[in-house]
Image: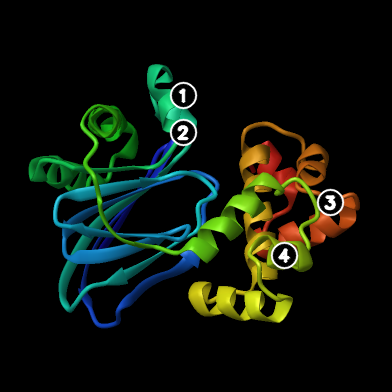
């Protein structure tokens, strides 16, 4: 069972399913914040080299551009709420803190159930203020009473790699430089990265650059400037890759079409 519910500032989805495969989501990232609330089940979130375990009534809020994958710990029923939202959904007083890092919290089960009820309503415009108020409560909880997540492990290779990529995302990133930064040969680095992330370093860098461009364009940066800010000197190349990845042109994204 799936319910999708969208407003101007938020895309929300409620899903009930049976777990028949451990991999729920392959590695991916978003240009917006993502909230994952577990109403029932037990999952592992691999977030940029950090691995966390979330159980019933726990929430993780993932910052924009952070690669993550989700796997299930065992079989059975799985219920979750996911939400994608920009900074405009977060009260102004909280935005600076939210920009710093992701958050993991434990919340009252009734709040997840209330959001689930709203997601099942047909009149999005009528119920949007109620949903916004419920989400604002979660945002305040995330800042005021954050819970220490169950951290399972930290991958030092990935941590060093992601840190370097984030610092040089506006430039052309060479595999030779990444290999040197992680003290490995180029072939060894590429093999280890792909075995851990199920994606090549080149594809990871490309997708992260495109996610950043999408975020910039969504915030009002012109496509030509966004292309330059992720290291593309040739706009036609950027246009072609952006269109292939997102299925729409940068100009249409910029104009909100």
Image location of residue 159, percent across then percent down: 52, 57
The answer to whether mark 4 and mark 2 are in CB contact below 8 A is no
Q: Residue at x 86, y 59 (%)?
A: 237
Question: 10 Å neighbourhood of mark 3: few (<14), some, or many (≥20)?
Answer: some
Tell whether 24 sits left or right of 146: right
Q: CA distance from mark 2 to mark 1?
A: 7 Å
The answer to whether mark 2 and mark 1 are in CB contact below 8 A is yes
Please name the residue that numbered disc 4 is placed on.
Answer: 180
Give whichever of discs 3 and 4 has the lower sequence position. Answer: 4
Q: CA distance from mark 3 to mark 4?
A: 24 Å
Describe the element under mark 3 as helix, strand or loop.
loop
Position of the C terminus, as image quadrant, is top right
Q: CA distance from mark 4 to mark 2?
A: 28 Å
- Which label is found at residue 96? 1
- Which label is found at residue 53? none
236 lies above or below 69: above
Please name the residue that numbered disc 3 is placed on.
Answer: 232
Viewer-side label of 4, 2: 4
Image location of residue 217, percent across then percent down: 68, 39
Question: 10 Å neighbourhood of mark 4: few (<14), some, or many (≥20)?
Answer: few
Please name the residue that numbered disc 2 is placed on.
Answer: 100
């Amino acid at each position: 069972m799936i319910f999708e519910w969208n407003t101007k500032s938020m895309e929300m989805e409620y899903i009930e399913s049976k777990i028949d495969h451990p991999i729920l989501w392959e590695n991916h990232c978003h240009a917006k914040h993502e909230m994952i609330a577990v109403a029932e089940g037990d999952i592992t979130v691999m977030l940029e080299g950090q691995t966390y375990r979330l159980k019933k009534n726990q929430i993780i809020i993932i910052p924009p551009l952070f690669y993550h994958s989700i796997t299930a710990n065992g079989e059975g029923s799985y219920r979750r709420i996911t939400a994608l939202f920009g900074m405009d959904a977060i009260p102004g007083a909280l935005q600076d803190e939210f920009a710093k890092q992701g958050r993991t919290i434990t919340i009252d089960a009734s709040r997840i159930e209330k959001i689930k009820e709203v997601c099942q309503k047909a009149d999005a415009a009528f119920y949007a203020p109620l949903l916004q108020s419920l989400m604002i409560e979660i945002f305040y909880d995330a800042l005021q009473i954050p819970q220490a997540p169950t951290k399972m492990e930290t991958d030092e290779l990935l941590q060093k790699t992601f840190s370097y990529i984030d610092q040089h995302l506006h430039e052309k990133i060479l595999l030779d430089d990444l290999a040197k930064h992680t003290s490995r040969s180029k072939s060894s680095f590429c093999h280890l990265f792909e075995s851990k992330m199920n994606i090549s370093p080149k594809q990871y860098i490309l997708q992260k650059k495109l996610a950043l461009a999408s975020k910039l364009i969504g915030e009002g940066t012109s496509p030509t400037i966004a292309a330059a800010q992720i290291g593309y000197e040739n706009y036609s190349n950027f246009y072609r890759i952006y269109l292939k990845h997102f299925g729409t042109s940068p100009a249409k994204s910029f104009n909100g079409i």
